Each structure stands twice: as C-alpha cells, then as structure tokens.
C-alpha cells in the first residue's frame, strides 16, 4: 500500500523541474523518465537508452566498480581499464621495492606478458538493474515495529534473490533507496584477474600530493591502466597464466576534440555515500562536532607519519598508501566543515525546515503524518551527541594506530577458535598468515608507537569517565603514566613482531592463540574496544535505529511537501549518472577559477627534489620541446585538468567524464576545496568536480611512458 504511491511521488516531482543543472546522482534505469529531457536540453546528443539499456549494449557495459571502492572504464576491445592512480595505488605499491620502484618510476608493460597480476583485485560490471520495491516491501505497513520490518524485508530479499538464475561470478545485490522507501536489485558480474598495465611515476600521478589534494587549480595526472583477463572461453576466471585479455561488450570511444566551458558533461560511476537530507541539527553535529574531533586526531597522527616519511625513503614507500588514506579524509572533513560554515549550509537547511513546517501547517492531513518528525529526529540527534564524540575519538585511535588495527583483526580470528575449535582456526591459518605478511611488510613499530603516544592521551583526557574502560585506566595507573603504558605495550607485545607471530601461527596454532590472548597489547585493545562497544557504539547504533524510520518518513514528507523540487536518492555505492557542464566558478574573493589547467602550470609549480612537487626530467624536456604530438589544443597547449559542475563523491574516483556524444574526455578524481560539503549540502554555484583531461592521460602514456602501442589499442575520435 505504500509502494506505488511512493513511485508516483518521485515521478510527479519531475513534472515541473526547471531545466538547469542542479546536482544529483541518478539511477541509470530511470534516466529516460526523469532526466533525459533535461540532459538533452543541456546539450546531450545521445539518448538515455545509449547510456543504459538491457537489451542492447550501452555505455553502462563499459563501466566497472573497481575493487569495490572506485570506478573504472573499459577503453579498448582488449579489456583495457582506465582508473585513477590513487585507485590503483595499492596494486602499484605492492609491486614496488627500493630496487624496482614502480611507484616512484612508473611502469609500462611492453606487451601482455609484462602485465602484473594483482591477487585480490577485482572489477564488477552491472548487467541489469530492476525496481524490486514491490517484492521487498510486500507486507510492510506503517504499523510494523522497525525490527519486524527489518525481518520481513530481509526475508523478502532472500526469497527474491532465490528467483535469480545466476552463473558463477554473478551476484545480485538488493539495496534501499530514499532511506528505504524504494529498493533496487543489481545483477553484477565479477572479474577477478585484473592486471596492472601501466602507471605514470607517482610524482605525476600524485603531483601536488596533500597540498593540492581537494584544491584547484590542479595539475595531477591521476590515472593508471589495468586489463581484465578472462578464461579462454571469455568467462570470468581467477588468475591463471593461460587466461586471455577480455573481449568486452562495449568500450568507450575517446574524443580528441576537447571541451569548452558550458559544454554538457556527464560522470558515470559508483558514488559511495552522501547524506543530503540531514536535518540542520544533524548537519551541525557532523560539521561542528564530529568532524573537528576526527580532524584533530589526524592532525596528530599525520604530524608523526609525515615527518617519518620525509626522513626515510623506505618509510616513504611503506607508509605511502596509509598516509594517503589518512590524509585524504582529514582534508576532506576540513573542506566540508569549512564549506558548510562559509556558505551557510546550516542556516539554509533551517530555512528550508521552516518552510516545510509552514507548508505542513496549511495541510492538516500532511501535518498529522509528517509534522512531528523533525522535532523527534532532532531530539535523538541531541541525545546522540555525547556518544558520537566518544565514538569519533575511539574510531580514530583504532584507525590510525596499526597495533590497534591488527589486534582487532586477530580478535576476529580468535573468535573462530573460541566458537568452532582449534581445528577450524588452524584451517584458517594460511589466510591469516597471508594477511599478516602483507600487514607487517611495511609495519614500523617505532612510528606506530609515536602515533599511539600522540593519540591515546585523548582517550584518557577527552572521554567522559563512563566511556573509558576501567582496565585501560588501571593500566595507566599501574604503569605510572599514560605514556609509560603505551611504551610498555609496544615494548612487550608480540604483535609488534610479525615474524615471530607468523612463525608461531604456522608451527603451533594453539600456542599462537594462547600467546595472543596473553599478550599485553592484545588485552589492552580488547578491553578498550569491548567497553567502547557496549557503552558507546551500541548506544550510538540504538539511536541510529530509532532515527531510521523517522528519516524514512521525513524523506517522504519532503517529497510530498516540495513537489516542485528534485530529490535524488542518496549515494550508496550503486551505479549512478551525474551531469552538468564543464565550467569553472567564481570564488568567495570574486576570483575567476578558470575551468582548465595546462602543462605550463604543472611546470610553474615544479620544485626539484621536493616531496610533493618534483617532476621527472623527461616531462621537463617534453615541455621545453613543446613535444605534445596530437594531444595539444589548437593553440598549442597541453590540457591537464578540467572542472565541471557534476555532483560527485568518494567512489566516483576513476569515473569517466563523458561529453555530449558519450565519448570519454576525462577522468574524474577529486572535488575543489569546500565542494566536499556537497556530501551534505550540494550547492551548484560552488561545487565542482575535478577531472584529468584525457589528452594529458594519452600524452603521458605515449610520449612520457613510451607506450604508444597502448594508445593504438584505443578508439580515438578526432
Ligand atoms: N581527494 C581525492 C579522493 O578523495 C584524491 C585522493 C588521492 N590523492 C591524495 N593526495 N591522497 O580520492
Ligand atoms: N577522490 C575521490 C575518490 O576516491 C573522488 C572525489 C570525491 O570524493 O569527490 O573517490
């Protein structure tokens, strides 16, 4: 009884949309009904069916979810996949040693034999998407309790999934949209033999590193190339030497024509998460309370890590990925909080809520259904604040201190021994050892200890006493001081000595289990987290559970009360299309932020030997000789990065930037400073996504990398 009205709610919302780009991340299968007209009015020359079609090949057949955390696209009929450098980073790093430093020097496979396999890496295609709201919500009524609702829905989903005839490597994912008002199923096909084909040196792929990250103007060549391999018969298969390059259903054509400001642009990929419909109060808590805590904790850990990386080239390799991961969110939260504050996100959201209440006041029936939601939501948000703060501190400790990370991983494994016996545990040892070998490869107990010394005092000093574990407090008392207990943890624990732990696991699993359980650091982390789970996380989750139905109703209320507005479902790592224009923006200072950067700008920023702004000598030579080949603009410049008004978020990294004809013109990789507020507060005047121009990508492969054979594999359109 709830479902069909909801669908018509979405559809009627679009009758009166104004024909201007206004953000949003849209479901490919709904474009024809909801967006096609607007997209074409903005200049798109293809149809919604060219983008998504289940009967014929369409652009969607060239898009992959890369490793589950980024997007990639197929750009040749031999399964070549383009994604960001920072998406391929883990793979690139894993092939790097001081002797053969792929990360630092770059790498281009001269032929398929040289392409490098990556255990664990996969890509998934979306075969088709279906609206399954009727089946998933069958029997659901407003009267059900939230837990009964959840049970019914998960039963319905199980039954639904059984109806799908799936081949090996196929899967069906069912996900909620509009806070659970609607459900879609995604049939996916996974390929697990994905090999590294090439990457520019990190000085180019990560040019500007943290200083330029999340900022404009930008000069980063943030791309890498992979290839999908299949069994000889073309079906997905795990790595095997006899596997062959994939013959894809579809690959993207590449436009060499370039783009102008105002041209239509489209981003096709897998945005991870947005929270576009938070109440003003929830937005305040996120941007003024939780973000600052997390930022402050990472200020401290990054100070330690950055100085260690600058001092030692081996540490620079070992910590590259970890540092990038920690720094990326750190800077993102800063941009988000600053954006919301500068552009009055909270005030604007409050004004919208006032209007919502006024509209409700004029409609007694609607007021009855939707009138109490905001006060109820806000009262829960207010009660949640204390645990939200504690949760932020502890999760930052767990995230930044490797000793904590590994203790938690081992805790999960010991549960197997406790619940299923030592045989079950022993059977898992090879996998555990594999994981640990990877983990300890770049582990540095000394740096890790300094991170812990920087972060743990917050636990003792910032958390209200009831959120602190008595055991953890006692340890500090016994040791005499907080820093003493941290020193002891690192000095006495076996978890900082990977080889001994691995050796024991391999020779004597029961001995290893006993040793871990008796380990001082293991116990410390265990007690801290157990207390945190019962006194903080469980409470936090209870609030979240109480919020879920309210937020779901509120979503419906918003759509009902603002029929003239466009509502797109929050991002949830499913395939979406965003569209807008290639365009710059005017900054707060009235400064015109031009939409494109060029190689000249890369060279302007060059600081020889610098940690972030060094460049390979060959690039300087190519620039001096203006040797840009077919990749230059008509006036002889080499485009590097370009801005657009597409609504994107984390996960959209590596997404193709497509032009009006659906051809590849760039590769999405970032947003501008303050744009990151778009996760909670998209503002079309400010929010811009950053793409690397495909001509720079091709230039780097061909001229810098000396791999023209790869460009020849692609379909370039003049
Ligand atoms: N900010 C971009 C994103 O969120 C790029 C991150 C990688 N670059 C870096 N300097 N850490 O993924
Ligand atoms: N760099 C982000 C990613 O890894 C995409 C940019 C963004 O968050 O806007 O997905």
Image: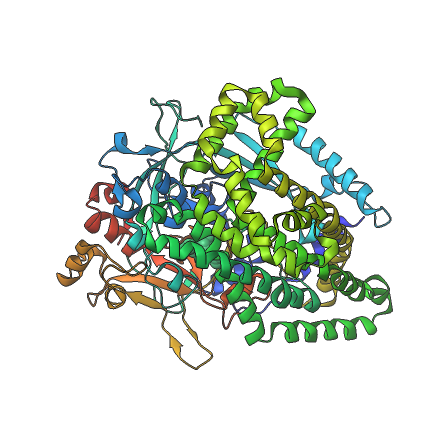
Image height of 471 relative to 641, above or below? above
Q: Where is residue 626 in the image (x, y as percent from the top left)?
A: 15, 62
Residue at 39% in and 22% down = 233
| Scheme of colours in the image | rainbow
Q: Where is residue 181 in the image (x, y as percent from the top left)?
A: 72, 51
Q: Where is residue 191 in the image (x, y as percent from the top left)?
A: 45, 32
Which residue in the rendered view is the most extreme toward the bottom?
590
Q: Where is residue 448 in the image (x, y as percent from the top left)?
A: 47, 47
Image height of 102 relative to 647, above or below? above
Q: Which of 320 and 61 is in front in this view?
A: 320
Image height of 355 relative to 248, above or below? below
Q: Can residue 59 be seen in this view?
A: no
Q: Nearer the viewer, residue 619 or 58?
A: 619
Q: Is residue 484 visible?
A: yes
The image quadrant in which ligand 1 is located: bottom left
Q: Which of 220 and 160 is in front in this view?
A: 220
* Snapshot quadrant of residue 339: bottom right
Which residue in the rendered view is the most extreme toward the left?
625
Marks counted in the figure total 0
Residue at 78% in and 38% down = 151
- Indicate left or right for 296 with 307 as reference: right
- Indicate left or right for 307 with 338 as reference: left
The quarter of the image holding the C terminus is bottom left
Residue at 44% in and 59% down = 303
């Amino acid at each position: 009884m709830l479902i069909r009205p909801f669908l018509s709610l979405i559809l009627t919302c679009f009758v009166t949309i104004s024909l201007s780009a206004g953000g949003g991340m849209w479901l490919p299968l709904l474009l024809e009904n909801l967006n096609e007209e607007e997209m074409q009015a903005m200049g798109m020359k293809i149809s919604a069916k060219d983008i998504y079609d289940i009967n014929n090949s369409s652009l969607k057949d060239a898009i992959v979810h890369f490793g589950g955390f980024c997007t990639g696209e197929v750009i040749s009929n031999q399964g070549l996949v383009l994604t960001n450098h920072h998406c391929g980073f883990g793979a690139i790093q894993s092939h790097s040693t001081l002797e053969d430093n792929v990360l630092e020097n770059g790498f281009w496979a001269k032929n398929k034999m040289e392409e490098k396999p990556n255990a664990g890496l996969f890509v998934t295609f979306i075969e088709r998407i279906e609206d399954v709201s009727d089946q998933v919500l069958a029997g659901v009524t407003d009267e059900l309790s939230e837990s009964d609702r959840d049970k019914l829905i998960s039963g319905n989903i199980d039954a639904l999934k059984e109806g799908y005839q799936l081949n090996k490597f196929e899967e069906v994912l069912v996900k909620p949209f509009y806070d659970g008002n609607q459900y879609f199923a995604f049939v996916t096909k996974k390929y697990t033999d994905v090999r590294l084909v090439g990457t520019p040196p990190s000085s180019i792929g990560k040019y500007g590193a943290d200083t330029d990250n999340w900022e404009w103007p930008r000069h980063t060549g943030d791309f890498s190339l992979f290839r999908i391999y299949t069994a000889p018969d073309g079906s997905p298969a795990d790595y095997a030497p006899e596997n062959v390059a994939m013959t894809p259903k579809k690959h993207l054509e590449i436009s060499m024509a370039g783009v102008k400001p105002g041209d239509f642009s489209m981003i096709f990929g897998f945005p991870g998460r947005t929270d576009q419909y938070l109440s003003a109060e929830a937005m305040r808590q996120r941007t003024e309370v939780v973000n600052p805590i997390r930022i402050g904790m990472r200020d401290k850990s990054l100070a330690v890590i950055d100085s260690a990386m600058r001092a030692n080239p081996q540490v620079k390799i070992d910590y590259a990925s970890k540092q990038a991961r920690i720094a990326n969110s750190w800077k993102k939260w800063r941009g988000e909080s600053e954006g919301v504050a500068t552009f009055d996100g909270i005030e604007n959201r409050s004004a919208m809520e006032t209007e919502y209440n006024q509209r409700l006041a004029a409609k007694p029936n609607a007021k009855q259904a939707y009138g109490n939601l905001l006060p109820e939501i806000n009262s829960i948000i207010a009660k949640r604040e204390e645990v939200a703060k504690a949760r932020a501190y502890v999760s930052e400790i767990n995230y930044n201190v490797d000793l904590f990370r590994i203790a938690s991983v081992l805790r999960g494994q010991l549960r197997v021994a406790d619940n299923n016996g030592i045989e079950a545990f022993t059977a898992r040892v090879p996998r555990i050892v594999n994981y640990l070998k990877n983990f300890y490869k770049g582990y540095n107990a000394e740096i890790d200890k300094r991170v812990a010394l920087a972060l743990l005092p917050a636990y003792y000093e910032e958390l209200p006493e009831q959120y602190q574990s008595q055991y953890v407090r006692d340890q500090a008392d016994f040791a005499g001081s907080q820093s003493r207990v941290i020193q002891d943890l690192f000095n006495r624990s076996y978890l900082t000595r990977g080889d001994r732990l691995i050796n024991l696991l391999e020779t004597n699993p029961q001995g290893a289990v006993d040793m871990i359980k008796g380990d001082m650091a293991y116990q410390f982390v265990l007690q801290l987290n157990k207390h945190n789970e019962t006194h903080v996380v469980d409470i936090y989750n209870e609030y979240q559970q109480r919020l879920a139905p309210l937020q779901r109703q509120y979503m419906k209320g918003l759509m009902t009360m603002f029929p003239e507005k466009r509502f797109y479902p929050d991002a949830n790592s499913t395939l979406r299309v965003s569209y807008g224009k290639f365009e710059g923006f005017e900054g707060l200072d009235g400064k015109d932020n031009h939409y494109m950067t060029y190689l000249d700008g890369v060279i302007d920023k060059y600081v020889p030997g610098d940690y972030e702004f060094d460049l390979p000598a060959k690039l300087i030579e190519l620039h001096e000789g203006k040797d840009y080949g077919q990749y230059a603009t008509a006036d002889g410049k080499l485009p590097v990065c370009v801005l657009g008004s597409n609504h994107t978020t984390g996960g959209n990294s590596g997404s193709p930037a497509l032009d009006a004809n659906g051809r590849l013109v760039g590769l999405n990789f970032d947003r501008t400073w303050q744009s990151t507020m778009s996760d909670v507060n998209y503002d079309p005047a400010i929010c811009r996504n950053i793409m690397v121009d495909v001509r720079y990508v091709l230039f780097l492969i061909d001229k810098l990398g000396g791999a023209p054979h790869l460009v020849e594999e692609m379909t370039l359109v003049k």
